[in-house]
Image: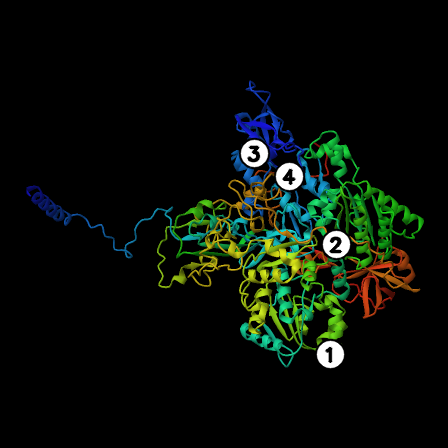
């Protein structure tokens, strides 16, 4: 009986003390919280340092995605590069887990600190490639998959990728 | 059964296996590259290294190659020893030195044996600092993409292409680490079986070109067990679909039929499914001659109303399933059912069927053909009419080598040793044909004769084998040939006679049956096999059940009494008969109702057109030339208003209140009804399990467990995902849920096993490595050896005699071009040439024409202009037309024809296949 009375008093005292602490409430959206650059929010598709689409439509993001909310179709461009003919993310299903970014072998798909994606209409949460593709390289400034990979594209012949020797002359018997 | 010890564990393994086979059979993961269950071992890649110990006390052991080490009683091995593991990792590391870091843009990625093996041995980082060797790729035609940098020099491609498939234009070139696998110069790969390189190559050097340009990873493909419809062999295939498009066709292992390999027509010809020529809607022809789209249900009731009044003739199709043909027969009545074949072809197929049913000889599976130690091919160009059989015959000539190896107690998997031992010694293969064939390079005896002579030599062989038959009067040279061939067949343990309807000559079928009968003895199972024209030729003949009109009879009927309604099932009559005859039929018929998948000339003459699903969107039972009933299942659902052929017919039957249709609702009801009605088709229900045999929750999933994009694929249409489509017609489901293990061999939609993403995971589904599937071999055989093998009279010459200035017209077949549907696949179309007429130089000289000129061919049904190609291998006085190629529909095989030089002949532009679609040059 005595102990519960003390407890009541202590509670009232603590409530009183809180009246003098600084308020935790943030006046969002007027006041924006700080989000780290690697915060996992809205997904974007980036471009390589030369300004071309980084995505090669390898499908690894789609298969890594736990709610299966990424769908795309590969195509081959005239210059030999693989690209996504369409690339669709259903953000109404996306759980912002970042698995797609981890799976991406070309650093094309990246998560950004933007999380403000509310819509009245769920259909508006379906993003196509034109909504996802940004103009810059995102977090990775220098990586260009085609400079590393052995696939020949216009402007980069066989033997011109990273660490590659000139194409072999098969008719030569020299050692 | 020797007992061996692997890492201390005792295992019982099969006698005569090598350690790699044994380990894989035991479920142990031992990485390998160069070994292939169909091609044996050469020990080239050094990847399957294990430690072998001398005895129990040996702790040190020595490294041996698993694939080159026979399992012997008490042998001791270690897969897990550190030294073996380190060795295997070093091997992978060295194989990967030059690998080009392009898995994301490689069409093999996700089903790559190299990826699997690399993960299996644990290699991760390339520590070598030197530069990577690079190679330039070659353009290998419209079917196969080449990316040489990915090569690990396992030599599987050349071993398959040259040693197994008999190709000559792919080889290993250059030396040391510059080794290059390609052609001596860029160009289309010549082999009809080049497509198997896609599956044989353990990495992405050879990939499916149409897949590369419209790529989907293996895990995203929705697949179902299917059967190839490109010829009568009935190879088992696994088509893969994504976003409503057929993406690729892979081999589906069937121990008795296709084994590990398909032909290129089957692998690449199925893409007609995506054709822009697909009929998209139900069409009704208006008064002004144009089609207008109408509602499917009202069309069904209008057509049913038509059927109820007046005489209806149903024209079936040898390229439609047994069920669809059966329903058509029920709709119009058996007396009004036509098999859809020309009278000549229909009679030939019926004749072949009779011979097979009566003959005491075994109708062999493709697998059994490979074990034949003497083969006679009578009048059939198997490479172009039933290509997979040609590949099997090519293996049969190696039986001599295996016999020599057995004498030396060499195991059959010692591939290089056996090839060295045998050199060019082969089992006898005799090919009698109208022109040189692609099997001639391994044949012991060849002759090019006109069809009549082939039949006569055939009968002479039979007479030689069985003295009782009347001797056939031949020239000295042919008599000698007949005697030699008879000798080879007589001394064989398993003789095989392959023939077919290719020449359009029933005497050849009789002669083959007579030879088989002469060869069959109490202790010797002779084999007799007939190649037929289409995937369900035998099925259509069986549905006709001894009756069934030919097209010519329908024509006569139309000319005499007229026909009120003509119901045509998936058949282009302009391929079967001449334009004038087909036109007159359409004029005589009141209403023409056509069910078909692609637009054809017949479409332009129909009053009603109902769009049907392709083989990839419907279920159906097909009867192969072996008499094997096999079921194909839909890979994906067709888009309304396209319906399955059997469903259209069943809907019409319900509407027209046809008695037999009343009790049928599902596909299996149709199959059961068909099996119960037609005695010879009783077995078709056993071709695959019925839908009801599997509880809904245990259905076999068509999608892999990694199937991606389920909540985004359709999100552009609506973000609200619909329920997954249910499949009430088959034991498969259109989802990734279900029960994928332990199912029947006929229900295998894809192969995958943990750690084995490539098609090499197949051994996990086999009862023994390279053996039959655990779930049983798909399909059921309907024809077993008969007992009334009545002696056949020699039919003698059935063809009209040649007058002066006339030539014998013989059909020549093309793997790409002679089959109706596969030529509508874009990649295959690039390899098709326009119809032509081949003739020996002597005939060309008489006519005064040369290569590229035109000749006018005077046929009974009108004149045809064709381009001349000189082919000196053709039999004397024979001219060969490209059978099945557009423009040759009315030509009758075996007929006598007059030729003259065509004036004002314009050569057709030549198509040259390129990397990105076709261009004219």
**Distance of label 4 from label 1 (alpha carbons):** 62 Å
- Tags 4 and 3 in contact by the CB under 8 Å rule? no
| SS type, badge 4 | loop
- Left/right of residue B289 with respect to residue B740 in the rendered view: right
Q: Which of B472 and B631 is in front in this view?
A: B472
Which numbered disc, 4 or 3, marks the residue that appears first in the sequence? 3
Q: Give the image location of residue B87, x and y in percent.
A: 57, 28
Q: Mark 2 lies on which chain?
A: B
Marks 2 & 1 on one chain: yes
Which numbered disc, 4 or 1, marks the residue that appears first in the sequence? 4
Q: Give the image location of residue B279, x and y in percent.
A: 61, 68
Rate crowding at label 1 as few (under 14), some (14 to 19) or many (20 or more) other CA atoms within 10 Å: few
Identify the residue under disc 4.
B36
Which numbered disc, 3 or 1, marks the residue that appears first in the sequence? 3
Q: In this view, does A167 lie above or below B537?
A: above
Q: Give the image location of residue B632, x and y in percent.
A: 60, 56
Identify the residue under disc 3.
B30
Identify the residue under disc 1.
B561
- Tags 3 and 1 in contact by the CB under 8 Å rule? no
**Distance of label 2 from label 1 (alpha carbons):** 38 Å
| SS type, badge 2 | helix
| SS type, badge 1 | loop
**Which mark is on residue B358?**
2
Which numbered disc, 2 or 1, marks the residue that appears first in the sequence? 2
Q: Mark 3 lies on which chain?
A: B
Marks 3 & 1 on one chain: yes
Q: Mark 1 lies on which chain?
A: B
**Distance of label 3 from label 2 (alpha carbons):** 49 Å
What is the residue that sits farthest to the bottom in this orientation?
B287
């Amino acid at each position: 009986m005595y102990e519960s009375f003390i407890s009541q008093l202590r509670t009232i005292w603590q409530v009183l003390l809180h009246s003098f602490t600084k308020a935790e409430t943030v006046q969002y959206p007027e006041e924006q919280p700080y989000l780290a650059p690697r915060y996992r929010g809205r997904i974007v598709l980036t471009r390589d340092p030369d300004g071309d689409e980084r995505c090669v439509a390898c499908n690894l993001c789609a298969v890594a995605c736990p709610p299966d909310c990424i769908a795309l179709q590969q195509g081959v461009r005239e210059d030999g590069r693989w690209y996504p003919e369409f690339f669709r993310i259903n953000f109404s299903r996306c759980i912002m887990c970042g698995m797609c970014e981890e799976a991406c072998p070309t650093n094309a798909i990246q998560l950004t600190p933007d999380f403000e994606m509310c819509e009245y209409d769920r259909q508006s949460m379906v993003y196509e490639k034109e909504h996802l593709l940004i103009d810059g390289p995102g977090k990775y400034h220098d990586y260009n998959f085609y400079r590393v990979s052995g696939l020949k594209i216009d402007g980069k012949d066989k033997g011109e990728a990273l660490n590659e020797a000139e194409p072999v002359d098969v008719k030569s018997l020299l050692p | 059964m020797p007992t061996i010890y692997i890492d201390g564990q005792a295992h019982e393994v099969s006698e005569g296996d090598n350690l790699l086979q044994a380990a894989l059979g035991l479920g142990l993961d031992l990485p390998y590259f160069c070994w292939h269950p169909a091609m044996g071992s050469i020990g080239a890649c050094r990847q399957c290294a294990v430690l072998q110990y001398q005895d129990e006390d040996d702790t040190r052991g020595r490294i041996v190659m698993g694939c080159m080490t026979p399992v012997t009683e008490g042998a001791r091995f270690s897969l897990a020893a550190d030294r073996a593991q380190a060795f295997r990792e070093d091997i992978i590391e060295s194989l990967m030195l030059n690998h080009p870091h392009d898995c994301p843009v490689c069409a093999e990625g996700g089903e790559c044996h190299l990826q699997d093996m690399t993960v299996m041995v644990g290699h991760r980082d390339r520590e070598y600092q030197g530069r990577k060797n690079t190679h330039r790729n070659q353009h290998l035609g419209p079917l196969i993409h080449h990316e040489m940098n990915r090569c690990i020099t396992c030599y599987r491609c050349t071993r398959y292409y040259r040693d197994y498939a008999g190709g000559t234009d792919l080889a290993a070139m250059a030396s040391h680490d510059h080794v290059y696998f390609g052609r001596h110069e860029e160009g289309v790969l010549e082999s009809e079986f080049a497509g198997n390189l896609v599956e044989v190559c353990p990495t992405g050097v050879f990939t499916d070109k149409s897949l590369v340009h419209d790529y989907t990873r293996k895990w995203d493909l929705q697949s179902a067990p299917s059967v190839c419809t490109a010829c009568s062999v009935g190879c088992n295939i696994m088509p893969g679909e994504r976003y409503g498009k057929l993406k690729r066709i892979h081999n589906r292992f069937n121990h008795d039929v296709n084994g590990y390999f398909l032909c290129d027509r089957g692998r690449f010809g199925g893409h007609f499914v995506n054709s822009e020529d697909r009929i998209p809607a139900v069409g009704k022809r208006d008064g002004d001659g144009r089609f207008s789209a109408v509602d499917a249900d009202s069309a069904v009731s209008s057509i049913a109303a038509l059927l109820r009044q007046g005489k209806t003739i149903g024209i079936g199709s040898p390229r439609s399933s047994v069920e669809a043909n059966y329903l058509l027969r029920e709709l119009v009545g058996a007396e009004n059912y036509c098999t859809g074949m020309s009278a000549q072809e229909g009679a030939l197929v019926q004749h072949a069927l009779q011979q097979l049913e009566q003959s005491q000889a075994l109708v062999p599976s493709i697998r059994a053909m490979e074990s034949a130690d003497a083969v006679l091919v009578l009048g059939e160009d198997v490479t172009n009419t039933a290509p997979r059989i040609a590949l099997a015959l090519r293996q049969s000539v190696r039986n001599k080598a295996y016999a020599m190896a057995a004498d030396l107690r060499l195991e059959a998997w010692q591939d290089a040793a056996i090839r060295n031992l045998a050199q060019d010694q082969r089992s006898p293969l005799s090919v009698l044909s109208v022109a040189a064939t692609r099997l001639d390079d391994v044949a012991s005896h060849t002759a090019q004769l006109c069809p009549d002579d082939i039949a006569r030599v055939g009968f002479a062989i039979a007479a030689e084998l069985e003295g009782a038959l009347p001797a056939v009067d031949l020239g000295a040279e042919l008599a000698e040939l007949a005697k030699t061939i008879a000798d080879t067949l007589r001394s064989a343990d398993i003789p095989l006679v392959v023939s077919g309807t290719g020449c359009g000559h029933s005497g050849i079928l009789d002669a083959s049956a007579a030879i088989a009968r002469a060869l069959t003895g109490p202790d010797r199972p002779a084999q007799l096999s007939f190649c037929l024209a289409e995937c369900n030729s035998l099925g259509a003949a069986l549905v006709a059940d001894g009756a069934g009109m030919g097209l010519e009879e329908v024509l006569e009927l139309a000319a005499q009494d007229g026909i009120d309604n003509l119901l045509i099932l998936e058949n282009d009559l302009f391929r079967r008969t001449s334009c004038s005859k087909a036109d007159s039929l359409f004029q005589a018929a009141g209403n023409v109702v056509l069910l078909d998948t692609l637009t054809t000339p017949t479409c332009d003459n129909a009053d009603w057109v109902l769009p049907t699903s392709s083989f990839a969107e419907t279920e159906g039972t097909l009867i192969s030339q072996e008499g094997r009933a096999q079921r194909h299942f839909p890979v994906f659902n067709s888009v309304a208003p396209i319906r399955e052929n059997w469903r259209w017919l069943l809907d019409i039957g319900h509407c027209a209140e046809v008695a037999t249709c009343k009790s049928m609702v599902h596909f299996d009801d149709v199959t059961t009804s068909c099996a119960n009605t037609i005695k010879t088709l009783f077995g078709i229900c056993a071709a695959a399990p019925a839908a009801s045999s599997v509880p809904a929750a245990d259905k076999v999933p068509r999608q892999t467990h990694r199937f991606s994009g389920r909540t985004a694929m359709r999100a552009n249409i609506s973000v609200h995902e619909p329920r997954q489509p249910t499949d009430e017609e088959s034991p498969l489901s259109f989802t990734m849920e279900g029960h994928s293990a332990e199912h029947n061999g006929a229900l295998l939609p894809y192969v995958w096993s943990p750690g084995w993403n490539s098609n090499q995971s197949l051994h996990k589904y086999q009862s023994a490595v390279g053996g039959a599937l655990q779930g049983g071999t798909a399909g059921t055989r309907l024809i077993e050896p008969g007992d009334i093998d009545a002696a056949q009279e020699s039919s003698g010459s059935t063809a009209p005699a040649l007058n002066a200035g006339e030539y014998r017209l013989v059909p020549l077949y093309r793997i790409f071009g002679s089959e109706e549907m596969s030529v509508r696949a874009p990649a295959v179309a690039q390899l098709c040439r326009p119809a032509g007429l081949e003739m020996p130089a002597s005939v060309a000289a008489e006519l005064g024409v040369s290569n590229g000129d035109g000749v006018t061919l005077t046929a009974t049904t009108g004149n045809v202009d064709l381009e001349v190609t000189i082919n000196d291998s053709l039999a004397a006085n024979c001219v060969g037309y490209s059978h099945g190629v557009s423009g040759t529909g009315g030509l009758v095989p075996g007929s006598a024809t007059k030729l003259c030089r065509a004036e004002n002949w314009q050569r057709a532009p030549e198509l040259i296949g390129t990397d990105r679609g076709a261009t004219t040059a």
